[in-house]
Amino acid sequence: METIIETQNFSPNYDHHQQHSDTPMQDLDAHAPASQQLPFPTFSQDILDECEDRLRKLEATQHQIVETSEHLLRLSQNESHYIPFIVHIWCRLLLRVNKSKKVALVYLANELIQKSILLSGQNQVHQLSFSKAFQPIIGRILVKLFEFLQKPEYNQIKIDILKVLKVWMQRQLYNVEHLKVIREELMQVGGLTEEDLDSKLPPRSYQDMTKKIEINQQNTNNQQRSQPVQIEEFRGGYDINNNWIELAESLKFLDENRVKIAKLEKELDYMVENLNSTDECDLECKMNEYQSLISLQKTYERDLLKQPLKMYNKVENNNFQEVLTLERIDQALTKVIKQRLSLRK
C-alpha cells in the first residue's frame, strides 16, 4: 500500500456547523454562486465521461493520484462548475469499486482537498473549490462506506481511511472538532478501537481468530489424549462422489440466492415508491447488487445443466450415446413399417 500523499503544511479552518440538504448534489450546488448553478451553458458530457473514466481506472499509486488530481485541478480552475459533478461521481464510485480502489479514491480526495486549499489564494474567495465541495458530504459518504465494509477482512481499508482523516485533523483542513466527531462515528460504525489503529499490531479480529484456533487445537489434543479411539475394524463409510457434493452445493446456493433476490426486490420496490426519502447512492448500489445476483443466478443455473455430463465417465457417456442411437434407429424402423402398411392399404 502506498503512503498517503501529503503536501505542504497549512491550516485553514472551515465551519461545519451548518444545515445541509438531503442529497450530495444539492449540498455541493449550494456552495456555488447563482451564476454557477444548474443549468450550465458550457456543460459537456464528454468532459464528465473522461473524468469518470479516470476515476474508475485510478490505482493507489503516487503517480496516478498526482496525475489525476492535477488534471482535475486544471479543469476546476477554468470551469469550476464541473466540480459538483466530479465530486458526485467520486461519491458514487467510492461505494461501487473494489476495495483497493476505494482507498485510492480517498487518497485522491485528500490530494484534491489539500491542493485546492493551497490554490485558493489565487482564486476569487466565492469561487467553488474541491475543498468546499467535499466539505458537506465527506463525513456522510465515509460513514456510508464503513457501513458497507463490515467484514473483518476490510479492517485495513478502514484503518487507511482513518489515517487520512488524521492528516486532515493535524493540518486543520476543516473544523477539527467536526472531524473528531466524524472519526468517532467511523470507528463506532467500523467496529474499530485505538488498538486496531496501531499499525504495529495485527487487526483485533485476526488476534481473536488466532486465539480461538489455538484453543480449539488444545481442546482437540486433550480429547485425543484422554479418549483414544479404537479403529482397527473401521473401514470408513460410503464414498460420496465429489460431483454429487458440487451439485448439492449449487442447489443450496441457488436457493439462498433466490431468497436474497426476493428481499432486494422488495427493498427496491419500496425505495422506488418513496424516491423523496431514498438515498441516491444507496439506491444505485442496491440496483447493482440486484443485477449481479441475477447474473450469478443465471450462471449457476447454466452450470447446473452441465452437471450431469460431469457425473459420468467417458465409457458411460459413450454407452449412453449408443442407447440413444439404437433408440433413434428403432424409431426410424417403426416409422418405415408404418409407412409401408399405409401404402398397402
Image (tube, grey):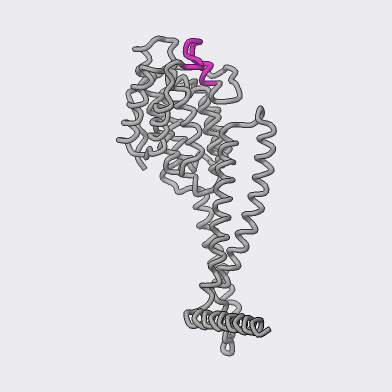
Identify the image quadrant of the N terminus: top left
Name the residue located 40 percent from the left edge and 33 percent from the top edge: 107
Depth check: 100 or 191 in front?
Answer: 100
Point 47% across, 41% down: residue: 97
Q: Position of residue 262 (x, y in %)?
A: 67, 49
The tally of labels here is 0
Residue at the spot 42% in from the left edge and 35% down from the top edge:
105
Q: Which residues are magenta?
A: 27-40
- Residue found 55% across the figure and 48% down from its top: 292
Would residue 274 be visible to someone looking at this image? Answer: yes
Reply yes or no: does residue 208 show up in magenta.
Answer: no
Task: Please state which of residues 288 and 130 is positioned toward the viewer in this rendering.
Answer: 288
| Location of residue 229 (image quadrant) | bottom right
* Above/below status of 276 relative to 293: above
The quarter in which the C terminus is drawn is: bottom right
The answer to whether residue 229 is visible is no
Residue 284 rendering spot, x and y as whole percentages: 56, 37
Q: Could you tell me residue 130's position as x and y percent?
A: 43, 22
Above or below residue 41? Residue 218 is: below
Residue 230 image-quadrant placement: bottom right
Q: In the figure, residue 76 lies in which quadrant? A: top left
- Residue toward you, 327 or 72: 327
Q: Toward the viewer: 295 or 276?
A: 295
Query: Looking at the image, which residue sits at the far bottom?
Result: 233
Left/right of residue 7 with respect to residue 230 in the rendered view: left
Q: Relative to 113, is 289 on the left or the right?
A: right
Could you say where residue 219 lies in the image, as x and y percent from the top left? 57, 68
Q: Is residue 221 above or below residue 155?
A: below
